Amino acid sequence: MARWCYRHRLLVLLLWVVALLGAGVGASAGGTAYANVFSLPDTDSKAAYDLMEKAFPKAAGDTDTVVWKVDEGSVRDASVRARIEPALAEIGRMPGVGAVSSPYTGARGAAQISRDGTIAYAQLTFTERANAVPKQLVQDVVDTARAAERSGLRVELGGQAITRIQQPPTGLSELVGLAAAAVVLFLAFGSLFAMLLPIAVAVFGVGIGLFSTQMISHVTDVPDIAPLLASLIGLGVGIDYALFIVTRHRRGLLRGLEPEESAVVALNTSGRAVLFAGGTVCIALAGMLVTGLRFLDGVVIGTSLTVVLSVLAAVTLLPALLGFLGPRVLSRRQRRRLAAGGPSRDERASTLAARWSGTVQRRPAWIAGLALVVMVLLALPVLSLRLGATDQGNDDASTTTRRAYDLLAEGFGPGFNGPLQVVSTDGDTTALVKGIAETRGVARVAALPPAHGVTVIQVVPTTSPQSERTDRLIDTLRDEVIPGAGAGARAHVGGVTAVSKDFASVTGDRLPYFVATIVGLGFLLLLVAFRSLLVPLTAAVMNLVAAAASFGVLVAIYQWGWGLDLLGLGKEGPIQAFLPVIMLSLLFGLSMDYQVFLVSRMHEEWVHTRDNARAVRVGLAETSRVINSAALIMVCVFLAFVLSGNQGAAMAGVGLAAAVALDAFVLRTALVPAAMHLFGRANWWLPAWLERRLPHLAVEAKEEPEEAPVPRQPGPASVIHGFIRTEEGSPVHGAAVTLLSKGGRQLDRVASLADGSYILAVPGPGTYLLAATASPRGSRAHHVVVTDGPLVHDVELREDEVDAVNQSALGRP
């Protein structure tokens, strides 16, 4: 498939362009139909909601609030009314505004003025839901209301529709994330064209995914946070997957492969790993379905579809783009060195990775202990995790919605922003109202006129909607007050605050089953891929450690408020109830990606040499740079979603950025390889009976040889492996190591890795000629004798001389 896409690159590119434009046109024509449907069956708040919907059909439109406060005097003063009433009348006449309830009309309006007379509010109802209200109408309402301000008179507005005009322009966070990713890619590749490839792949995958999600919202319930989360994860994985493939392709070009062959090899190796990694992300996302929270179904659809399209773009569009660029994916310096016949390498970067890999091998216990201490310390705040729901009280202090929220709390009590609704169908309502009024934590109680046998009792708590005392009040009403109101009393506690509490409780109860599902599936996938029990077990434990540490960071920032003002992230509060499920899905999928790319290289080396220390050392040296680059891109993309204006997306972005940074820079770079050094050969142990029963799955195929294979000599095949070093002991990266037959025929040719290691395939026992060349050093060859096992042959290169060290079974020419 890679070869076909490479050769038919113009057709492939046109197909992707047509798909993107077609999806965009279809989405624009249909518009959006996102719906936040919190379906919580078998909960008390759901029962209350169903009764209210039956007795009091809800208004079709969104209800928002205009709040004003005077510094002196009263809001009833004629001078204040002369400015506010015309503004409210003008708002009421705007097309799209259904009604405006003023505190200056009727007896009920008097309740909209605070006891001290300094704060009042008016409710305005739009004819459409918040997402469907035109932004221009909302802006006109805000401008008209704010125009009534004067010295000593403040006017603020709150509500879901008002929030829309406070949000940054659509796509700002995505653009900032892409710009940051572009900088990292350019530093990693040193080539403008190579930098653009992963970004192009991500744009096509995410663009079609978002347009498709928008169209799907017309046939099923998709929450409005789904496209934000889909673009967040889609940009991250799309850029990362293309990065892995482009890195392998550039390595092939530097080894002398033709661009087409190098692209085919890259897709047949790293492309397979990308397919496997994308599958693990989708499986982790699908794990959300086991929670039974229908609100998350739309999130699963949107994010999974975007990941699938990003993977598809990486394995089809990317090889086509590689065909257009040819060798220009290399930097100019690399192309010049390649044309001159010398190796092209970044010795500083490769030496750093190789030295770190060697350090981990020499001090595994010390490094593992230090990394574990860091992760445990960061995870400690998770013990204080409290799930709930954020509201406009968590907005930044500079926003009008936050100021309106604070004014209402000041004038009518902290609980005014989240009243409870006790819905009664039978029993003595009078006794129930009296019992609620006498309950500790209740500020005000008012029973509305009954309708269709249903009575709604409005209960205003003395504490804010996010307070733990409000949660305890809900439990008291349900467990003590309602049962104590009389034998025939039947009532349920509802309202936004009660729904949020029930949602958090349901999520917490089902979270263990969800975690067990995705951990178990991840364990089975890695078990099949790497034929080991300890490798997938280590990965599962590390994933849990990373999750705990990332939630610890979230609790410290968003729940404890550490750095919130400095970062401009609003006010502290509980962690969004849906966030653990979404974050764990994405985190486990992304962690599996890095585990696959790291361990697949180790596993390849283990299969060839059966040397665990060498396998771990080479795997870490070879993959750490690309994994760290990919993680840095992820962190930039995720942190950019702090600019999205959506509290849930911003919280998810911060949490995922912390999780990916800890996973890549601490776990995969330090703790995992250190632990694998300590475990030794046990890393690769698998019971024989299980080995026979497991299916075979090749995560990453072997690279095809550059030359046509020669007929095997009699006897078993073997390998020659070792290190190419300078006389100072530094590894030589990119040295050309060639194996020739006695007649001078080339049998195998490789370039030494970042740590100076190499491995050559040998057809069978016999005498061969091994040559090592590295510019500007000289080139010499030695005869080596291979018996029936692997031959270790280390080479020390110095200018105009080659000295063989550790010359086991070495013959002189």
Image (tube, rainbow, N blue to C red):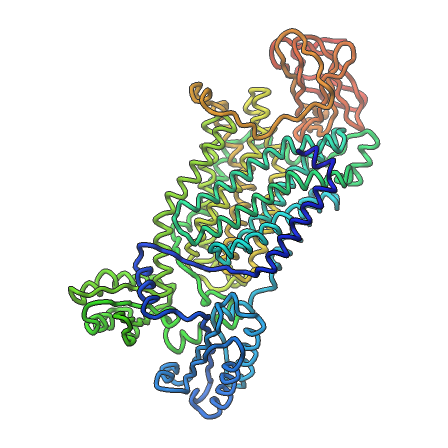
Q: Position of residue 717 (x, y in %)?
A: 63, 13
In the visual, does 522 lie left or right of 798? Answer: left
Q: Residue furthest bottom?
A: 78
Which image quarter: residue 623? top right
Residue 807: tell me if it is visible: yes
Q: In which quadrant is the C terminus drawn?
A: top right
In the visual, does 202 lie left or right of 443? Answer: right
Q: Position of residue 620 (x, y in %)?
A: 59, 32
Residue 355: tell me if it is visible: no
Identified at 29% across, 67% down, the residue is 422
Out of 108 and 93, give the one closest to the viewer: 93
Count the labels in the image. Answer: 0
In the visual, does 96 lie left or right of 473? Answer: right
Out of 139 and 575, give the one closest to the viewer: 139
Q: In which quadrant is the N terminus drawn?
A: top right
Out of 10 and 210, give the one closest to the viewer: 10
Question: Is 117 rendered above or below residue 635?
Answer: below
Q: Position of residue 312 (x, y in %)?
A: 61, 41
Q: Residue furthest right?
A: 340
Identified at 48% across, 32% down, the residue is 525
Question: Is 20 rendered above or below residue 332?
Answer: below
Q: Residue furthest left?
A: 487
Out of 305 and 607, give the one closest to the viewer: 305
Q: Position of residue 303 (x, y in %)?
A: 53, 49
Which image quarter: residue 110? bottom left
Q: Residue furthest top?
A: 714
Question: Is 788 rendered above or below residue 99?
Answer: above
